[in-house]
Amino acid sequence: MKKIVTIQDISCFGKCSLTSALPIISAMGIETAVIPTAVLSTHTGGFKGYTFRDLTGDIPQIAEHWKKLGLDFNGIYTGYLGSVEQVRIVSDFFDDFGNSENFIVVDPVMGDSGKFYAGFTEKFVREMKKLCSKADFIIPNITEACLLLDIPYKEDYSQENVKNILVNLSELGCRVPVLTGVQSGNKHGAMAYDSEKNVFCSSFREHIDGYVHGTGDIFASVFTGAVTLGKSLQESLDISVGFTADCIRATLPCMKEMWYGTCFEYCLGELTDYAKESRK
């Protein structure tokens, strides 16, 4: 069985980060080890008064135990990291567990809609750039791409603009940058650039009105699973964009509050079927 490790926080309520990544990747038939960076009563987007327990000090101890056990992984996938110290510790984890036989995915969670998420700073961006340089794949949204490249954020981009952003992201050191939240006419999706092959890929679905929290985590988790299963860049984009769109559609009719997250549970069966097909 293929196996990955994902490193990010876990919210006890509200579907994002590990609360989404673990069931989604598991549904794809992939063993999913986890390193929680923090435990929260709810996620921070829309809820107030949440509890927070920082687990930064536990990460090196977990890594040291795993080294003694001789564990290895087909992939390493990071999501939300809450501090510069965590980014540096995860960088050390890459050095210890990354190798020529596996791959690293970094989702550089820092902001959206042209703004930082609470608690992030320019110092964090500088450290995140270093982490991205060690990754095979990075998956920023447009806001995060602008932060990484130190360019002004704007809402409208041409296809050529997006391609230039992707090329510049690859120059941070990653092999394949994947840009989410890309719009093309009345369609919404993602574009990627394989810097080794000098090839661009894209995948779009019809734009769906309405915003639902946690779709970036869904996309990154499905993409990581698809790559783990040996799918091409184009195939990985297609299933990630398609599944994310399906989750949004399934959520809108029953959504109480957008920040509760998507009803991805309704769609997990299609991921399980996809994984079964991939193993034949």
Image (spheres, rainbow, N blue to C red):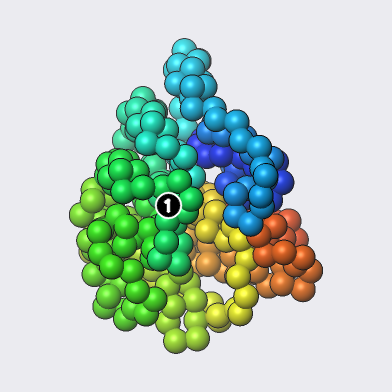
In this picture, residue 32 sits left or right of residue 149: right
Residue 257 in picture, x, y percent from top left: 72, 64
Residue 187 in picture, x, y percent from top left: 50, 81
Q: Residues within 10 Å of mark 1 (few under 14, many from 20)?
A: many
Q: Which residue is mark 1?
A: 110
Residue at the spot x=55%, y=80% of the render?
Answer: 207
Residue 144 in picture, x, y percent from top left: 38, 58
Count of number-bearing discs: 1
Q: In the image, is residue 215 above or below residue 24?
A: below
User: Label 1's element?
Assistant: loop
In this picture, residue 217 sits left or right of residue 67: right
Residue at the spot x=49%, y=45% of the render?
Answer: 80
- State which quadrant residue 149 falls in: bottom left
Which of the pair 39/264 is nearer the observer?
Answer: 39
Residue at the spot x=59%, y=65% of the render?
Answer: 244
Residue 277 in picture, x, y percent from top left: 62, 56
Res 233 seen here: no
Most extreme residue toward the top is: 68
Most extreme residue toward the bottom is: 185
Residue type, mark 1 in image: Met
Q: In the image, is residue 51 above or below residue 136?
A: above
Q: In the image, is residue 247 above or below residue 39?
A: below
- State which quadrant residue 190 falls in: bottom left
Most extreme residue toward the front is: 49
Residue at the spot x=39%, y=42% of the render?
Answer: 104
In this picture, residue 154 sits left or right of residue 212: left
